[in-house]
Image (cartoon, rainbow, N blue to C red):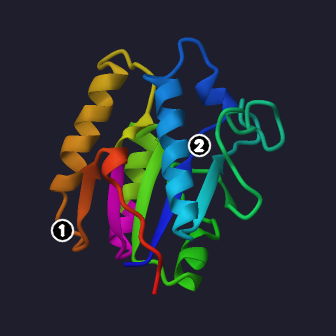
Amino acid sequence: MRTALLVIDVQRAFFEAEPRPHEADAVVDRINALSSRARAAEVPVVVIQHEARTDQVEHGSPGWELEPRLAVVEHDARVRKTTPDSFLRTPLGGLLAAWGTERVVLCGYASEFCIDTTARRAAALGFAVVLASDAHTTHDAPHLSAERIRAHHNATLPGITSFGPAIEARPSSEIVFARAG
């Protein structure tokens, strides 16, 4: 199955904010390991960055920049977005179609917003979705800790079957990338 790895919103504004996201450094390490394995298998890596004109993530601002520890290489695809949906008004769908992608692996920030929305949209568009269960994160919320938010999404997203394609949550160390063809 042709796969692409989507690395969502691993940006300074989100990862350097105090308090930092749950397991921030460990999540970046897991994302880097996923990206390394994907590149070794010639699986496309797409680095997605959120932006807003009047926000801490204005395009080109220090907060918009990628978290410095995130390993990115020149041939990684880059996508800019303005909503939690990585497909809405972006070239992501076209890139995935051009590559013949059938499955996407998701990791990054924020579990309850951009990860959740992108997972649902990908499944609605017909992609099988693998959520790297320990490689997405968020900040604590008044109603729930970040750890519980992540656990909730890992438990509930795979329960959505009405889109057709499966959504599964799997630890990043268990995600295997195979060369296409």
Magenta segment: does it hold 92?
A: no
Left or right: where does residue 72 sit relative to residue 115?
right
Location of the C terminus by quadrant is bottom left
Closer to the camera, 163 or 168?
A: 168
Q: Quadrant of residue 74?
A: bottom right
Location of the N terminus by quadrant is bottom left
Identify the residue at horizontal 72%, vertical 29% (top origin). Answer: 56
Magenta segment: does it hold 130?
A: yes
Question: Given the current orientation, which residue lies at the most extreme top position?
Answer: 19
Left or right: where does residue 127 sit relative to residue 90?
left
How crowded pointer 1 is (Cα within 10 Å; few <14, some 14-19, many 20+) is rated as few
Q: Position of residue 77 (x, y in %)?
A: 68, 64
Q: Is residue 27 visible?
A: yes
Above or below: residue 60 compared with residue 130: above
User: Which contiguous range is marked in magenta?
Assistant: 121-132
Identify the residue at horizontal 23%, vertical 66% (top origin). Answer: 166
Q: Position of residue 28 (x, y in %)?
A: 54, 35
Identity, as a three-letter code, of the amino acid under mark 2: Asp
- Return the residue at label 2: 9
